[in-house]
Amino acid sequence: MTDSTPSLLAQGYAWLPDRVRRAAEPFVRARLAGRHAVALRGPEAVRFLYDERHVRRHRALPEPVKSTLFGHGAVHTLDGQAHRVRKAMFLSLLTDPGRVAALTDRTAEAWDEAVERWERQPRVVLFDEASRVIARGVCRWAGVPLDDAGAEPVARDLVAMVDGFATPGPRHWRARAARRRREAWLARLVEGVRDGSADVPAGSAVEAVASHRDVDGEVLDPRTAAVELLNILRPTTAVCWFVAFAAHALHRWPGNRARLRDDDGAYAEAFVHEVRRFYPFAPFIGGRAVTDLTWRGEAVPSGALVLLDLYGQNHDPDLWKEPYAFDPRRFLDRPPGRDELVPQGGGDRALNHRCPGEDVTVSLLKALSTRLARLEYEVPAQDLSIPLRRVPARPRSGVVLTGVRHPSAD
């Protein structure tokens, strides 16, 4: 079987959906980086992949991904009880409604402060500005000391880790350098918390990570603690991708703006879910088959990569009526099924590897999309295309806005 890695790099998000379409079934075989791989799609596939009797993450994540996106020793690389104990720390921080609300409030405050500055600027690039806003908000909430001058370089590094994980070349090397910088920075902070030289708020994310004890009863070494702090700060800041997509949607389908302006909470949530479904974020996730398996009569050999086609599933006509139409109303009648809408993975977040920050993503995007809809601005001529060959994809221009002003400024 010919190795498909060059095709994956060339096609990006379209690679797996194209193969599934040609196969006419939600199961395909491939070879990636010399390894046997199978790719699945659909709610049944989600449950199969997230069953640890079938698939595990340990030794499944390639080194380039660990050295950029997740970090070595991260919760994403653990399985079994070790994973559950580490994951419990994230769940306590990122799923508690009060904590989620506090993080959203901090970020909304940072957005409102930024708007005052945007009103004095001839143009803003929303992707870049949103990354700074969210980085400032999540650092304030987490207890990470960060002054206004430090927000831009921190945001730039957090974005770089996401932007360069899936591509060779300059973006990838920037991601590695950004991770080294920020792990060293946060490791020093953890050491300071432990020796009393750094003062952080009681109950903050920094304090929780610094004091966390793993399954062996030991605290995390400073570098691993820094990795896990970054696994709070980095994915939260990555919501800037969705903010740019939300602006793209409001520009292409402006009829959504009025309902968001009216503070229709149900519609805002439906809009957020549709942004997360419609636009490209993660192309797929995967793990390693722990034994010889069978899925729908197809053999999956032990050690094979097992991939879940996230982008394809979010556009599967068997799950979504008119999947390439942007229509938030599809989520007004019922909330999305746990194993149907999978932009950030599937499964049970308390037991599996599903992203524990999904509530944070939805809450932040609701708040910021509503605020964006209430702003007055122009969208000048620019390249708003979203090339699916680029992983992670985003509007080429970053969504440039001019004449930004709050209606109250009239």
Image (cartoon, rainbow, N blue to C red):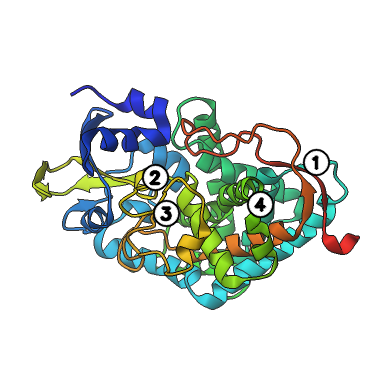
Toward the right, the furthest residue is: 410
| Along the line of sight, the residue nearer the viewer: 130 or 262 | 262
On screen, residue 32 versus residue 157, left or right, reads left
How far from the left and from the top, in percent, is residue 125? 72, 41
| Residue type at numbered disc 2 | Tyr
- Residue 311: mark in rendering: 2
Q: Is mark 3 on a helix, strand or loop?
A: loop
Q: How far apart are marks 2 and 4 (CA)?
A: 24 Å
Of the numbered discs 1 and 4, the one sitting upstream in the chain is: 1
Residue 141, percent across and down?
A: 63, 66
How far apart are labels 3 and 2 at the CA level? 10 Å
Helix, strand or loop under label 2? helix
Residue in the picture at 62% in, 60% down:
138
Crowd class of label 4 (few under 14; some 14 to 19; many from 20; radius 10 Å): few
Circle 3 residues within 10 Å: few <14, some 14–19, many ≥20: many
> In the image, which is nearer the foreground, mark 1 or mark 4?
4
Query: Which image quadrant is residue 11 in?
Result: top left
Closer to us: 310 or 106: 310
Q: Quadrant of residue 83?
A: bottom left
Between disc 3 and disc 2, whose residue precedes?
Answer: 2
Rendering quarter of residue 368 = bottom right
| Residue lying furthest bottom | 98
| Residue at the disc numbered 3 | 344
Q: Earlier in the sequence, mark 2 or mark 4?
A: 4
Q: Mark 1 points at which residue?
A: 123
Label drawn at residue 254 = 4
The CA span between labels 1 and 4 is 20 Å
Assess disc 2: are there few (<14), some (14-19) or many (≥20) residues with their C-alpha within 10 Å of its C-alpha: many
Choose the circle earlier in sequence order: 3 or 4.
4
